[in-house]
Each structure stands twice: as structure tokens, then as C-alpha cells.
Image (cartoon, rainbow, N blue to C red):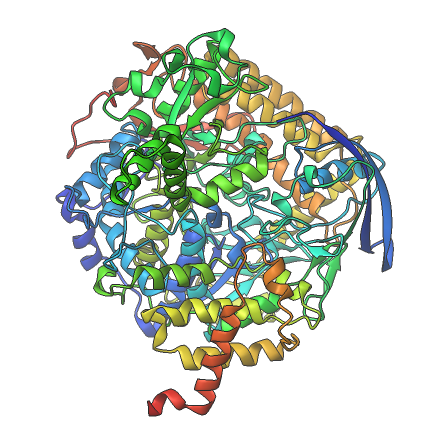
Amino acid sequence: MAGKTINIKVKVWRQGGKYPKGQFETYDLKDVGTDMSFLEMFDVLNEQLVSKKEMPVAFEHDCREGICGTCSMVIDGQPHGPMKGTTTCQLHMRSFKDGATITVEPFRAKSFPVIRDLVVDRSSFDAIIQAGGYISVNTGQAQDANAIPIEKDTSEKAFDAATCIGCGACVAACPNSAAMLFTSAKVSHLATMPQGKVESQKRVQAMVNQMDKEGFGMCSNIKACEAECPKEISTDNIALMNREYLASVLGSDKEG
Amino acid sequence: MSDKLKSNVPEGDLAEKWMNYRGTMPLVAPGNKRNIEIIVVGTGLAGASAASTLGELGYKVKCFTFHDSPRRAHSVAAQGGINAAKNYQNDGDSVYRLFYDTIKGGDYRSREANVHRLAEVSRDIIDQCAAQGVPFGREYGGLLANRSFGGVQVSRTFYSRGQTGQQLLIGAYSSLSRQIARGSVTMYNRHEMLDLVKVDGKARGIITRNLLTGKIDRHAAHCVVLATGGYGNVFYLSTNAMNSNVSAGWRAHKKGAFFANPCYTQIHPTCIPVSGEYQSKLTLMSESLRNDGRVWVPKKKEDCKKDPLSIAEEDRDYYLERIYPAFGNLVPRDVASRAAKYVTDDGRGVGATGLAVYLDFASAIERYGKSEANMKGISNPTKAQIVELGEAIVKEKYGNLFHMYEKITDENPYKTPMKIFPAVHYTMGGIWVDYNLQTTIPGCFALGEANFSDHGANRLGASALMQGLADGYFVIPYTIGTFLSKEIRTPIYSAEHTDLEKLKKENTDEEGNIKEFITPNAPEFIEAENAVKERIKTFLNVNGSQSIESFHRRLGRIMWDYCGMSRNAEGLAKARKMIQELRAEYHKDVFVPGSNEEYNPELEKALRVADFMELGELMVCDALNRNESCGGHFREEYQEGGGEALRNDEEYMYAAAWEFTQDNSDWNLHKEQLEYKDIEVKTRSYK
């Protein structure tokens, strides 16, 4: 852990309070340790602002371990910044050069309205899950867990989809602000497992309809979502969801 | 035993208590459930599982979280796994053995009946989660896989790679989402509980702040369930999430809920060491790594700054294997952490700060590599071949953890040993609850890490997830009936019914007695709301010169130095004074920017840090009162044979439940004597 430091400028989107329409503000930061995480750099910036009795930059964060999905930020044009498969909280300053100007904006999408500065409202994601992202089983109804053997590979595939942290980077990355990767990850996780198969048709229709209702855009196969997903969720899930959706609408599986 | 503490443990044989109690306890009929409202605060494993299950049963549930979504709660970060006495491995596991391991792991400071119930329902949890679609790790035959955790000699831990907490939480969140969609649960995201409201001695609601608008609201219900997590962030640096806090529990404490064993803190041995002043939190490396990683430091102090790869095998001290041959690297967390402290105190710590030890996978890589080479029929494999094959296996098992380690430290743990050090991880102490999980305030319940009941003085790995879900899915849905069955005749009115006199008249019987009814317009609610508003105003008006963060950091430093891995009477007395002074300074010189009527995370933090300062003092008092060492509580004055904890069962075999006194001077101590009828109390040995 070398004790290197860099000097940077951070160009941050400020919105709300003093900045009713929203605008960029640029701040100088000196002697930023390269072992510092990106959010710790923001902590330092905010300490500076507070010491001048100014409003700190609002940003969301919680676990700082890359798993809760709370942190967001578009850093130099990329949701969660330049490092592949990494959330903002796990990004470190060693990824940036001395003298760099780093531009930081909120996730931008019609369905993610800005609350303040870098904080957006992602409750549309909850609405999609509430529409059908579950298996209808009440507590106490379950049979023994080993009564349904599931092939290891199948279970791993379901896990790969289930690992979505609901951060919204896929929407922010998509030029159409589509929520296809998020929605398909849940559809795919549950449809892959035998427990979830039973109501998979009803589920996919309800979730896709809700996704449209929330105002998310259409998918045009650009795959920016997969490239920016901090959990590297595959667009194969979108293909699976489309198949599920078509089958459910056409009812083809009922004939087979 | 204090007469204010009734544990309400049912009579009968330990193994039959829960079953018999369930069969005889009072219930609420389905028709009545529809008229009963329950507030659940928190949406982690305990809160989400409780809210969804109570919703399924037909109660009207209001559920609150300060997060933007229930899926963010910090249960999500648990890595390693969840224990259950399934005995799928046929390795001798049983409900009794899980019970025994948990009691022993907790150093004989937990309540026997609660722990046995926990072990019993552990099996149902796995069934429930599998049915929800949680993708547990599986064997090639399609059945569930298990791994081992510290302090036990069986494999009973179920897991989803290194993301078990996430998968279990998403399972609970999906059940909760289903109930929200059905309308049985009303979800309040971005609402923080700022006070508990008591009416006629019963918990009847909460005061919340809408974190987007600052609006203060009164919410009434028949009872309140707190599932608000632990208080590890009192140390500033911990593995808790940045927003984890004690405020909900602390507010309940100030309204009469006793706080039990606050000094029992779990310091987790395998975390990434502190790297600088700006550090905001610490990151855990799962205990599962100790299945394969070997912990060591150099034997000679002069070797500590050398490249670890240049230190010869005979110059390394694999101290856990040396001191604890029976459990080796898999001793319980408190034991492993203390051992790391001793070797670093001895000047043999490594890394830039000298506050780290090595966790080395070279032996595991070699062992797996040889075995793979054998299976692949490679005779006389080269060293490079072995390493390559071995690394692939290690990657399969722990890839995501190694990846995370490399991201944070910029070092490759396949090639050079990890550096790790203990960090605050979990708090065994919490709100005192009886067997029904009810606090000392009737109608106020506490679940999961927020309560004190199951882990004694030290929690075993993979038992937090088990307890959170046990409480939420399989305990509270039954035990809440013991309180609510007496409430079926108590009507509840919404805030629109503003005419209190009219409500009183409606609830007056023929003899002129006013019957109990619930309304958020009751004077107790108004009073609590005004007190919250006043508190917020006070903080905004201080307009001092120091940031909230700087105070929190200073508090954390005091707690870690004097009430951390080891404590002594002198240091604790000093710490108490330091905390009192810091608190006075805080209220005089803190700066809280902005206003109440806006999105203002600094204001949220200001209120939480204020509560941490009060809790910190209580933790110190508790640690000072407990003149013994047990589990995570290590008093330097009480040790034997090379730094092992020396319990004093004669005098301290009790849970210390602290009552807040309104004059804010000292707490009253109430003792719940712990009895062990079904287990022989021994000195804990892992040697």
C-alpha cells in the first residue's frame, strides 16, 4: 500500500438548494491518496465544504463493499466509473492520473428523477419487483429444501442473474434508458429455477408491463448495460426474458 | 433476578418448550387480524421477513426504512453463510449440537431456551429460502452444499458463493414486495424513526422524518416491532454500512426499553487493515477464508518489514495452529482476534502500520494443485503447474473475495499473502427481550441484531443470518399474538379523526368508563412529535465550527482504544469521562449545514451521532461493571494461561439489562440470572 498522492479537479453536478436548475461546479482537491476510495475522496471534499459552512455534495452510499447497490454516479461518462465490474464505492483513486479533471454526474433517466445533486429516485425498480419479481410462497409452506434437486449449473446460472444489486447503472448506461437488464435478471433468476417455473408466464408479463408503465425505454441491443453492470450481468438474460415474454403472450408452451 | 425482567420462558423440557408453547399460546383469529395494525421498523433479514410474514397472516403492516429501497439493508453484505441443523452431511449434526455450539461459542452468556428454539427453527429457514428461489450452492448431484465455520466441528453452513446475505435478503425482499403489491404491507422508504410513542405504558407508534422533505409524521399502531440492526458504528470504523445506527433502539431505550449487555462487541479477525486517516469503513474478508488460509506472523521482529515470500518457513509463526491445535485456524472469532492482538502487541505485526497479520493461501494452493494434477493424471507436475491448478481451485471457491481484496489493496492475494486485522463487525448486545421477543415496554418487540438474546458474549460465524430470519419468519409471527390477543377490542383511528372528544365519547361504555383506543392525534403523539422537532432545531441552531464526521471519528477512537479488543478498569473510567466531555463539546460546537425541510444527510448523521455518544457511555459502564472476561468482552485484569478469557460464573452469570433514568445521570442495572439446565457449563477450550 504505497502512500502516493495526486492533485485533481472534480467537476460535480449540483442540483437543488442553491442550484435550482442544476449546474456543474468544479472543486480542487490536493494530495488525494491513491489508496483512497472514490467515495472517500468525496468525504474529503465534503469535509472541505462543511468547513466553509457550505452544503456538502449529496450522494448516496451505504455498504461501501459493492453489494447494497446504493451508490451510483456517472464518472467521466461511465456509470460507476472506468473500472469494469466495479461499483463506485469500490473504485479507488489509483485509477486516476495526477492533474485529472473528473466529471461526476447523477444517473440520468426519465424514470430516475434527480432528488439532489447526485441522488436520484430509483423506486421504479421496486415497482417492477412488486409487479411479480417473487415466488408466491407463504412462510411455513415450504417442503424440505433437498426435495427439489437442482442441477449445479442451473443453480449457478440462476445465481449469476440473481446477483443484480439493483443499482440502475444499466438504465444510466442505455441511450434509451431501458430497464431490460434489471428486469430480465430477475425474470431469468426465477424462471431458471424449478420453484419459479410455475408462475413464470404471469410473472414476465406483469414485470414487463410495469417496466413500460414506469416509463423505461425500449431495448435496441446496444449492450451498454452489460458493459457497465458492476456485477457483469449478461444480456443473455434479456434474450431469455424476450423468449419467456413471447411464449407467455402467444401461449406456445401450452400447446407443446 | 430483577422483578422488572420476566423472561417468560415456558415450563417443560428444553427440547419441547417451543413446540408445546406454540400449541398453547393465545392467537388472534383471522377476522381480528384485519383490524390490527403493526409497525415494523427496518427491512433487513429480520424486518423484511417479519413484515412479509405478518402481512401474509392478515395483519395490517406498516414497514419503515431509511433506505431508498428495502433491498439495501446491511444484511445484504453478509458473505459467508447461514447455519442450519439439517445434518445433510451426515457428520453428526443435530439441533442439540447447534444449540450446544451456540451456547458454548457465546461463552455461556445467552439464554438457553431462546438458543434452543433458534436451533430448532434453523431447519425451516433453509426450506423457506429454497422455496423462495434463493440460489444456494449445490453439489453435482443437485443437493445443497455446506461449508464449515469457526468454533464448530461439523459442516452446517449453507451459502450462495460469498454473497449469502444478499441472496437471503433478496428472498425476504421479494416476499415483502409481494405483500406490498397485495396491500397488506404499506412501505415507507426514506423514512427514519426518530422516536417511539408510548400511551398508557404500551408502545403505540413512532415519529418519523421523511428524509426527502423533512416532514415529521406520527404513525400509530397496536404494536411496534424494531428490527433496526446493530450499533457497531459507535466505533466509527467498522464493517457496518455507513448509515447503520442505533437511534431507533436508543430512542426505545430512552422510553423504557432496557438495553442488555451493550459491551459485548464482536471484533472480526479477518478484515482489511486500515490504510489511512481518511478511512471511512472497514471491509470484511469472509471467515470462510479460514477454511483454507493459514494465519501467521514472522517469529522475529526484524522480519516484519520484509517481503513475506522471503521469510523462510521455519521463521514463520502459525500462531493459531500452534496455540489451538484442535481448531487451528478455525477458532471462534473472539479467540482469533485476541491472538492477532497479542502478536501485534508483541511487535510482530506486519504491513506499513504494524497492525496486520498474514492470511496465506500458498499451502492451500499447493494442496489443491497436487490433488488436481493427480486427478488429471499429470505425473511429476512442475511447481508452476501445481500453482496454476491450485490457483484455479482457490479462485472457484473465493474468487469474488480475492477480487475485492485486490481492488481495495492493489495487491494480488494469489501471489502474496493477504494482510488482515480485526475490526468491529457485530454487536451481541442490544435491546433486552423476553422469550416472546418483547422488550420491557409492552407492545414493543425487538428482532435480529437489534436484540440481545441469542449470541451471548460472542456470536459464531453464519449465525447472524440464521437469527435474523428465525426471529422474523418463525418466532415473531407466533409470539406477537401473546400481546395482540389482548388488543382485539382496541380500535385504531387514522389521523383524519381529529376530534378527540368525539372519539372518547364513541369509546365510552354504559358505566361512563373510557375504553382504550389508538389515535395518532393523542397528546402523547403530539408531545413526542414536538420533542423531535425541538431536537432537530437545537442541532441546526448550534452553528459551531466542527463537522459531525470529526466528532464521530473522535468517539470511535475512544471506543476502540478503551472499549475495544481489550479493556481495563482504569481505561474504561477514563473513557467515560472523555465521552462525557466530547458529548458536551458536540452540543456546543457541532456544525449542521442546511435546514430540516430538505434532503439533508448531514442532519440525519447529526441525530445518529448524538445517540451513539450516549450509547458509548453505557457500553463503557457495562464493560466496567462486568469484572470478568467472556467472549468478546476481554478485561485485562481477568485472564489466565497466556491471555485466555477468565469468566466469573459465580458473580456474572447474568445478562446485564440497563434501565435509562430520566435524570440522565446513571443507569439502573437489572440482572437476568442465566440458568443452564441442559448443558454443562465449562471453561471454553478450543485447544
Question: Quadrant of the rendered structure where residue B556 is?
Answer: top right
Query: Where residue A44 appears, x then y in whole percent?
Result: 74, 36
Q: How many marks?
A: 0
Query: Where residue B512 appears, x then y in whole percent?
Result: 44, 66
Query: Where residue B141 appears, x then y in whole percent?
Result: 23, 58
Q: Is residue A108 above or below residue B399?
A: below
| Left-right relation of B104 to B593 | left
For the point 31% across and 27% down, the residue is B331
Residue lying farthest to the left in this orientation? B13
Q: Nearer the viewer, residue B388 or A160?
A: B388
Q: Nearer the viewer, residue B167 or B531?
A: B167
Q: Quadrant of the C terminus of chain A?
A: bottom left
Q: Quadrant of the N terminus of chain A?
A: top right
Q: Nearer the viewer, residue B394 or A63?
A: B394
Question: Quadrant of the rendered structure where residue B587 is?
Answer: top right
| Left-right relation of B87 to A188 | left
Residue B178 showing in the rendered view: no
Q: Is residue B541 above or below residue A244?
A: above
For the point 59% across and 32% down, the residue is B236
Q: Is residue A237 above or below residue B3?
A: below
For the point 47% across and 89% down, the residue is A249
Query: Where residue A248 appears, x then y in whole percent?
Result: 44, 85
